[in-house]
Image (cartoon, rainbow, N blue to C red):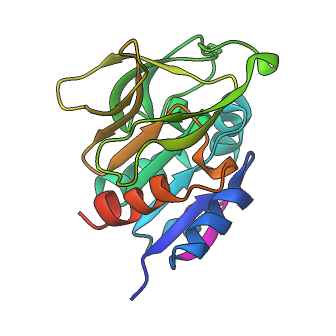
Amino acid sequence: MAAQIGVLALQGAFREHRLMLDGLGAATRLVRWPADLEGLDGLVIPGGESTAIAKLLAIHGMYEPLRAAHAAGMAVFGTCAGAILMARAIDGARPDQEALALMDVLIRRNAYGRQVDSFETTVPFDGVEGGPVKGVFIRAPRFAGLGPGVEVLSRTDDGEPLAVREGRALAVAFHPELTDDARVHAFFLERVVGS
């Protein structure tokens, strides 16, 4: 049976994630309310605007149900803003912005510059075959502090973490969904959801 994967669809690049996951054979659905989390094997929290997504998570009553679903075994994959929200602490967050605290990570918002500083590049990624993966960096965050149980899967040439995993949680600083390279999503399905 295909993995049941939700894509948080409150704001951001959720359509692109869904298309990529559908192309890999996952059974996807959009998630907007707590009831939408029922029966999911995994959830993708897309890139977008982390403060807007955080406000909408609160309005939709999603914080505690999402934490509970993850604690009960649902895998979670966050890209860019999604990675920001998954952290235990957010450097540069608005005072009213609540972190989901799904990973033992301190993350710094907008660490790679403003929108005009966006770029696309390839990055190495442990556990993915076929060489470096494609990623788009748009106001990308930086993983500024990692707990002892957090594994780094990808680094810049100067050692900055770009992708991290802790158990059934995967977070990347870039947008793989804005490329034609589905290997990071395949890694999530096979190695994180399937673990």
Camera-nearest residue between 10 and 4: 4
31 is within the stretch colored magenta: yes
**Where on the picture, by quarter, is residue 50?**
top right
- Residue drawn at x 62%, y 47% is 46
2 up-or-down from 171: above or below: below
32 is within the stretch colored magenta: yes
Q: Is residue 15 left or right of residue 7?
A: right
151 up-or-down from 183: above or below: above
**Position in image of residue 82 (x %, y %):** 56, 39
User: Which residue extends farthest bottom?
Assistant: 1
**Position in image of residue 102 (x %, y %):** 37, 39
- Residue drawn at x 37%, y 41% is 125
Quadrant placement of the N terminus: bottom left
Camera-nearest residue between 107 and 185: 185
Q: Is residue 195 left or right of residue 36?
A: left
- Residue drawn at x 63%, y 58% is 17
**Position in image of residue 173 (x %, y %):** 52, 31
Quadrant placement of the C terminus: bottom left
127 up-or-down from 15: above or below: above
User: Which residue extends farthest front?
Assistant: 130
- Residue drawn at x 70%, y 35% is 55
Camera-nearest residue between 142 and 10: 142
Is the stretch drawn in magenta largely helix, strand or loop?
Answer: strand
Magenta span = 27-34
Q: Is residue 162 visible?
A: yes
Q: Is residue 126 left or right of residue 174?
A: left
Q: Is residue 60 visible?
A: no
